Image: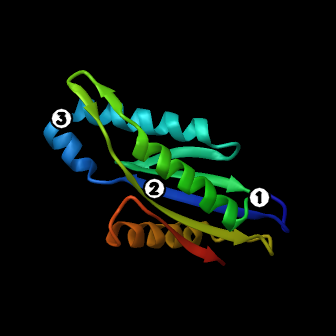
Amino acid sequence: LQKSGSLALILFDIDNFKEINDTLGHRAGDIVLKSLADRCSSLKEDGMIGRLGGDEFALGLPGASAERAVELAERIRISIEQMSIPLPSGTVNTTVSIGVSQTRLLTDQLDIEELFASADRAMYRAKTSGRNRTASAGTS
């Protein structure tokens, strides 16, 4: 990344994922995780997606504006909401709560921890305001 660039971060986790594991089993949970990762990978134009652990994912978007990151987050959210995930025992539908944060790189230093913390706080706001939402931390 160049000093004058920016970095956006999209964090999301699966709403009520524990219920999927508890009622349908961990194999079903694994299928859901893989299906969502595949869907997100197909929707992003650039950047890098990864699973942070459990049911939480991160998508880093070098050079992306906050507006572009929120637009992509909403495309991801809507696409997942419309998915019907095939399982051995039938199908399951799920949603995600998303937090978006963005920073402009004005110095050689990038506070990754603060970028993650900001996106995490936004994701928590999305969850506490009803789930299946995207919340933005704004530009820092």
What residue do we see at 23% from left, 26% from top?
A: 90
Determine the CA span between mark 3 and mark 2: 22 Å
Where residue 19 appears, as percent x and y from the top left, is 19, 47
What's the residue type where badge 2 is placed? Phe
* 29 sits left or right of 36 in the view: left
Q: Do the residues bearing badges 1 and 3 touch, measured as CB atoms within 8 Å?
A: no
Secondary structure beneath dot 2 equals strand
Q: In screen coordinates, is 102 left or right of 121?
A: right
Mark closest to the chain's N terminus, 3 or 2:
2
Give the structural element (helix, strand or loop) at label 1.
loop
Quadrant location, the C terminus: bottom right
Residue 63, labelled with which disc? 1
Q: Is residue 46 above or below residue 67?
A: above
Of pointers 1 and 3, the one earlier in the residue sequence: 3
Disc 1 vs disc 2: Cβ atoms closer than 8 Å? Answer: no
Residue that appears at 31% across and 40% down: 93
Residue 57 vs residue 14, the one in the foreground: 14
Instruction: From this view, report whether residue 69 is shown above or below residue 76.
Output: below
Sort mark 3 into few (<14), some (14-19) or many (20+) by Cα contacts within 10 Å. Answer: some
Residues at discs 3 and 2 in contact (Cβ within 8 Å)? no
Callout 1, which amino acid?
Gly
Specify which label sits upstream in the sequence, 1 or 2: 2
Which residue position holds label 3?
Answer: 24
Residue 44 horizontal/vertical position (percent): 63, 43
Q: Position of residue 70 (x, y in %)?
A: 60, 62
Give left or right: position of 37 versus 43: left
Alpha carbons under labels 1 and 2: distance apart:
20 Å
Quarter-of-image position of residue 1: bottom right
- Dot 1: within a 10 Å radius of its alpha carbon, few (fewer than 14), some, or many (20 or more) residues? many
Based on the displayed image, in which of its 4 quarters is residue 71 positioned? bottom right
Which percent across, then down, holds residue 81? 41, 47
Q: Residue flagged by tag 3: what amino acid is it?
A: Leu
